[in-house]
Amino acid sequence: MNAVISGVYYLDVPGNSGDIQFRIRDNDGWKDWFVKSETGSMILFDAKLEHAVSENKSECPRVSLAFNLYSLPLDIQNESNDYSSQNFY
């Protein structure tokens, strides 16, 4: 299933716990940018946009809820196991 929108809601973001990173391919390679993670904020973005989180360098956990939104009708016959924590998503 292909999500339309991805998002993350930040429940608790201690200082120095990392931000969300996005990237898109352009003519010269990759264009990267960051959005600051803040407690109580929600970030919505195109689900096709590659994203990752930077390392949590604080002593406390960063707590967030990540989710994907899909359009109807759902195509439940198209299953994929492409996700891996080793990939940039």
Image (cartoon, grey):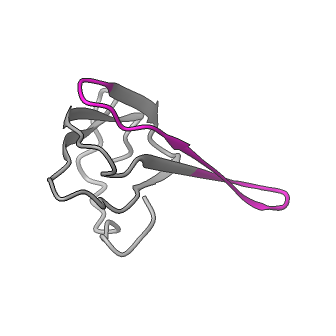
Q: Residue 37, located in which quarter of the rendered image?
A: top left
Please name the residue shown 30% across and 61% down the image: 57
Q: Residue 56, located in which quarter of the rendered image?
A: bottom left
Q: In this picture, is 47 found above or below 58?
A: above
Where is residue 66? Give x, y as percent: 25, 42
Describe residue 32's horizontal placement relative to residue 66 as left or right. Answer: right
Q: In this picture, is 41 found above or below 51?
A: above
Please name the residue shown 25% across and 39% down the image: 67
Where is residue 52? Give x, y as percent: 42, 56
Describe residue 14's horizontal placement relative to residue 29 as left or right. Answer: left
* Nearer to us in this view, 21 or 85: 21
Please name the residue shown 24% across and 40% down the image: 13
Question: Quadrant where the C terminus lies?
Answer: bottom left
Q: In this picture, is 5 found above or below 15?
A: above
Inspect the magenta stretch and tell me whether residue 37 lies in it: yes
* Nearer to us in this view, 16 or 42: 16
Which residue, as the protein is rendered here, is positioned at the far bottom? 86
Where is residue 46? Give x, y as percent: 49, 35
- Which portion, as a residue range, is magenta? 23-41
Inspect the magenta stretch and tell me whether residue 65 lies in it: no
Where is residue 2? Give x, y as percent: 38, 45
Please name the residue shown 15% across and 53% down the image: 61
| Number of numbered labels in the structure image | 0
